[in-house]
Image (cartoon, helix red, strand yellow):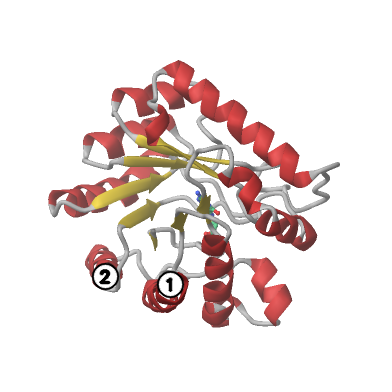
Amino acid sequence: MGILNVTPDSFSDGGRFVDRERALAHAHQMIADGADIIDVGGESTRPGASPVSVDEEQARVVPLVEALAREGLLVSVDTRKPDVMKAALAAGAGMVNDVRALQAPGAAEAAVAGRAAVCLMHMQGEPRTMQKEPHYADVVTEVRDFLVGRARASEAAGIARERIVIDPGFGFGKTVAHNLALLRGLRVLVETGYPVLAGLSRKSMLGALADRDVNERASASVAAALAAVARGAAIVRVHDVRETVDALKVWQAIETE
Ligand code: 7PJ
């Protein structure tokens, strides 16, 4: 899954892709580099990011979703807002990627009506404050139980089991130690039977571990993506598609006899 940010304040693309043509070109490059899904997001969830109105978010994402879906690409929409989900699904998106795991009123209904696949992500707290003092007794078990609960609720709402992906939400209300525990214990999520998505690309835990600024985290991100796939992740959400795909090709050739 290649990340396409259309947020002027997104922390790692710095608004470079606000221009639609450039955003489309970037998506095409990610597909050429081996991405299977393009994840279009119009609202930054970074700690302290300013909120975006429904109208503004739709204006950012819908034209891109429409253009990419028209080309037959699988497009995911990274949003917490049911109205944005509806508009993106009507424009041809095939997947809803919701950091709130469809907890907003109307979100599950929007996904059901749009016959979407969904990615249900775990987050402790709210983006503005989530990194203040994250706390867990047992992070792996708590995240798993939350995600299984949300998956069951989604199924009860009418989303087919085979359309549900779960995601531990690296960096969303988690310390570096929590993130490492979740990555080490990713098998516990995989064993639920739901495909697992891992989003570690350029995140601050990698900055802490490798001592790199956000735009110098490609190698650290590739290492993290490989570690996630080695533990059973089905999808990795990444900025550096070419580097990640190269590494996965080598790794898979070695692992496959
Ligand atoms: C994630 C996401 C993630 C899913 C973001 C960033 C922050 N969606 N959206 N999983 N992260 N499913 O890319 O650093 O980890 S936004």
Q: Is disc 1 surrounded by few (<14), some (14 to 19) or many (20+) residues within 10 Å?
A: some
Q: How many marks?
A: 2
Queried on whether the Cβ of the residue with tag 1 lies below 8 angstroms from ligand 1, the answer reads no
Closer to the camera, 139 or 68? 139
Taking the spot 32% from the left edge, 34% from the top edge, the residue there is 116
Decide which of tag 1 and tag 2 comes sooner along the chain: 2
Q: Which residue is mark 2?
A: 22
Q: With 15 as the anchor, is 27 left or right in this view?
A: left
Q: Position of residue 203 (x, y in %)?
A: 61, 66
Q: Is disc 2 surrounded by few (<14), some (14 to 19) or many (20+) residues within 10 Å?
A: few
Q: CA distance from mark 1 to mark 2?
A: 27 Å
Q: Which residue is mark 1?
A: 248
Q: Position of residue 195 (x, y in %)?
A: 47, 44
Q: Position of residue 250 (x, y in %)?
A: 42, 79
Q: With 46 as the anchor, is 43 left or right in this view?
A: left
Taking the spot 54% from the left edge, 43% from the top edge, the residue there is 99
Queried on whether the Cβ of the residue with tag 2 lies below 8 angstroms from ligand 1, the answer reads no
Q: Quadrant of the C terminus?
A: bottom left
Q: Is residue 103 visible?
A: no
Q: Quadrant of the N terminus?
A: bottom left
Outermost right residue:
137
Outermost front residue:
257
| Amino acid of disc 1 | Leu
Q: Is residue 253 visible?
A: yes
| Amino acid of disc 2 | Arg
Q: Does dot 1 land on a helix, a strand or a loop? A: helix
Q: Does dot 2 land on a helix, a strand or a loop? A: helix
Q: Position of residue 206 (x, y in %)?
A: 65, 72
Q: Is residue 83 above or below residue 156?
A: below
Residue 78 got which mark? Answer: none
